[in-house]
Amino acid sequence: MQLMQGQTVIITGAGRGIGASAARLFAQHGANVVVSDLDAEPANDVALDIREQGGEAIAVPGDVNDPDFAPRLMEECINKYGILNVLINNAGYTWDGMIHKMTDKQWDAMQDVHAKAPFRLIRAASPYMRDAAKQEMANGEHPVPRCIINVSSTSGLHGNAGQANYSLAKMGIVGLTKTLAKEWGPFGIRSNAIAYGYIETRLTQDKAQGESIQVDGEDIPLGIPDHLRGMVNMLIPLGRSGTAEEAAGAMVLLASPLAAYINGHCLEVTGGLGI
Ligand SMILES: NC(=O)c1ccc[n+]([C@@H]2O[C@H](COP(=O)([O-])OP(=O)(O)OC[C@H]3O[C@@H](n4cnc5c(N)ncnc54)[C@H](O)[C@@H]3O)[C@@H](O)[C@H]2O)c1
């Protein structure tokens, strides 16, 4: 069964983790995939891998915080595939600190990547999504399937010590999603969010592995201290963290025709954490 046959999907942060798994799963379901990431090499590798498996993908590397990036990403997508059906705002990272120690830079960085960048991408997509659907309706046609998926977090919905900056942005994206559901719903464009709990990726792996992301020349360490990783598992009714493939499944589900009447929803994909 191919749920996304012939549709075109942009996924930001698709060079690794949840985004990379989603790129592969969308391709398996027949979609053309635009694999976008800050890091060119993993983005190119994912796109190449998809093509080698018989799927269709291009890589468009770039920084979602660059104000010129969103229009360029849309242009490259439209030049290659002629249409944009699904935009997934997934790119991001964490930069934790307790409130009393958090710097303005740390605060702003999270709002930029998790809230402002999705807003800019959605705005840049509007000619190819909102306006295109409006034109189809004016022509008396039923608009083709289109939707936005924004990635949130249980840290946004429930708060998380050490993540005031991230929590605000991840709750904000839910507000943006619901607003968009109301603004673009009349054009048949659905908008939904997914709040992930604890998914095994670079963001949640053992901090001792020493992974980091470079932001304005600064190395931001990524990961969670190992003793905390074990503790979270005990709070999850399914008893374990989720895989990137399981997380990707929720994206395909929400983008697919099976979710044709789901709009303005925030789906918690957590194994039951926090219920
Ligand atoms: N892993 C989890 O448990 C979890 C839980 C809740 C929410 N999330 C969210 O899921 C999304 C994906 O995270 P992940 O866990 O797959 O992490 P990840 O680090 O494996 O992947 C994130 C990708 O985003 C890219 N990225 C970061 N900043 C970028 C920028 N400025 N421009 C373009 N690309 C950029 C990175 O290069 C990376 O490839 C993030 O928004 C994250 O906040 C993850």
Image (tube, rainbow, N blue to C red):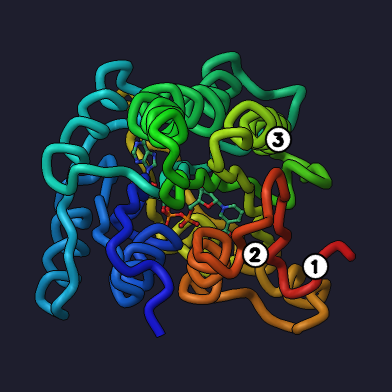
Count residues near mark 1 (Cα–Cα under 10 Å), then give few for <14, some for 14-19, many for 20+: many
- Amino acid of disc 3: Lys
Q: Nearer the viewer, residue 109 or 136?
A: 136
Report x, y in % for residue 98.
Answer: 73, 32
Element on which disc 3 rests: helix
Q: Which mark is residue 91?
A: none
- Amino acid of disc 2: Tyr
Question: For mark 2, what is the residue?
Answer: 198
* Residue 105 in view here: yes
Q: Residue at x 72, y 39 (%)?
A: 162
Q: Residue at x 31, y 70 (%)?
A: 24
Please determine whether, in this image, residue 72 is positioned above or below residue 154.
above
Count residues near mark 3 (Cα–Cα under 10 Å), then give few for <14, some for 14-19, many for 20+: some
Report x, y in % for residue 250.
Answer: 57, 67
Report x, y in % for residue 18.
Answer: 45, 62
Is tag 2's residue or tag 3's residue first in the polypeptide sequence?
A: 3
Q: Nearer the viewer, residue 270 or 203?
A: 270
Is tag 3's residue or tag 1's residue first in the polypeptide sequence?
A: 3
Element on which disc 1 rests: loop
**How far is the residue under mark 3 from the one under mark 1?**
23 Å
Residue contact at pointers 2 and 3, CB within 8 angstroms: no
Q: Quadrant of residue 163?
A: top right
Question: Residue 31 vs residue 92: left or right?
Answer: left
Q: Which mark is residue 273?
A: 1
- Amino acid of disc 1: Leu
Q: Is mark 2 within 8 Å of ligand 1?
A: yes
Please determine whether, in this image, residue 60 is positioned above or below residue 206.
above
Q: Residue at x 52, y 72 (%)?
A: 249
Question: For mark 3, what is the residue?
Answer: 178
Which marked residue is nearer to the observer: mark 2 or mark 3? 3
Count residues near mark 2 (Cα–Cα under 10 Å), then give few for <14, some for 14-19, many for 20+: many
**How far is the residue under mark 2 from the one under mark 1?**
8 Å
